[in-house]
Amino acid sequence: MSAQMPPGGSGNDCIGPGSHRSTLSVGQPDAIVPSAARPRLLDLFCGAGGAAMGYHDAGFDVTGVDIEPQPHYPFTFVQADALTFPLDGFDAIHASPPCEAFTQMSARWRGKGGLADTHKDLLTPTLARLRGLLVPWVVENVPSAKRAMRPTVDLHGGMFGLGVYRRRIFESNILILVPKMRAPDRPIGVYGDHPQNHYSTRLNGDMKGRRSEFRRARTIDEARELMEMPWADWNGCRKAIPPAYTRLIGAQLLEHLSERIT
Ligand SMILES: C[S@@+](CC[C@H](N)C(=O)[O-])C[C@H]1O[C@@H](n2cnc3c(N)ncnc32)[C@H](O)[C@@H]1O
């Protein structure tokens, strides 16, 4: 296991919202360095840190774990397998296993011996590890992963005034309350291998050949703004959940932790 330094050396070089810089503890070789007095949250399958930033904003000291290098992750990072990473010593745990095994987009290609069949279900073993733990935990995934989860929370960008829809469901061992809000009127998606410099149309799937416009972020700057992730690259943005989701959840996790202490 090794902690990873962002390119260019010290963690303070990390690009992130200015207000977060002084509290970052990135790039400590072979060590996880918590900042004093903040409860510690383990961010499994951390990606570029969309979820992490929300928990940080809520008041957690965040440590991320991902099997791939994450040079833009703005907090302490450990490159490791989330399925075997030790869970001890954390006050709360979040996990975002990859969704490809469950997405509707890849559903039609499954069972045909192609790329879609190589996507492993990492959600089920993650839930098996976390269910039964006493420490509060949260697992998120795409709505079509419902069959593998017992979700109690359903969030989308409209609840936070975001331009992305990015609906995600969450299972947790604590009660989480969420606002009820309309989806964004004309959401813009952040997905695909790269930004596209035009909006596209697609078949509606109603067998009548009708097409509807779907809009995708056209530049990395647009993706960063939509996701509220100014430090992330395209790949990081397209895989992430917006920090707003975990800011809401993190505040309630903290409240839960403080109730347990008093
Ligand atoms: C959906 S993305 C996470 C997005 C992240 N929660 C965010 O908000 O930015 C899933 C991540 O899981 C990572 N991953 C896949 N298999 C893994 C494993 N066995 N252990 C750790 N990370 C893994 C991928 O590299 C990817 O970054």
Image (cartoon, rainbow, N blue to C red):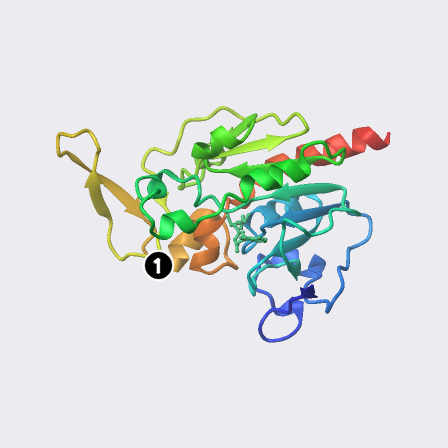
The residue tagged 1 is 194
| Residue 155 visible in the picture | no
On the image, the x and y values in percent for residue 36 come to 82, 53
- Nearer to us in this view, 236 or 19: 236
Q: Quick one: quadrant of the N terminus? A: bottom right
- Above or below, 36 against 140 in this view is below
Give the residue at the far bottom of this rendering.
8
Q: Which residue lies at the image location 50% right of the left edge and 53% below the top edge?
A: 229
Could you say whether the residue bearing mark 1 is in a helix, strand or loop? loop
Mark 1 residue crowding within 10 angstroms, few (<14) / some (14–19) / many (20+): some
On the image, the x and y values in percent for residue 61 come to 72, 50
| Residue 154 visible in the picture | yes
How many marks on residues? 1
- Nearer to us in this view, 7 or 117: 117
- Above or below, 248 against 15 in this view is above
Q: Quick one: quadrant of the C terminus? A: top right
In terms of image quadrants, where is residue 183? top left
Taking 160 as reference, is 82 left or right? right
On the image, the x and y values in percent for residue 96 come to 56, 44
Taking 253 as reference, is 18 left or right? left
In terms of image quadrants, where is residue 260? top right
Mark 1, ligand 1, within 8 Å: the answer is: no
Q: Which residue lies at the image location 36% right of the left edge and 57% below the top edge?
A: 193
- Above or below, 258 against 237 in this view is above
Give amino acid for label 1: His
Q: Which residue lies at the image location 73% right of the left edge and 67% below the top edge?
A: 28
On the image, the x and y values in percent for residue 2 come to 69, 66
Q: Which residue lies at the image location 31% right of the left edge and 55% below the top edge?
A: 218
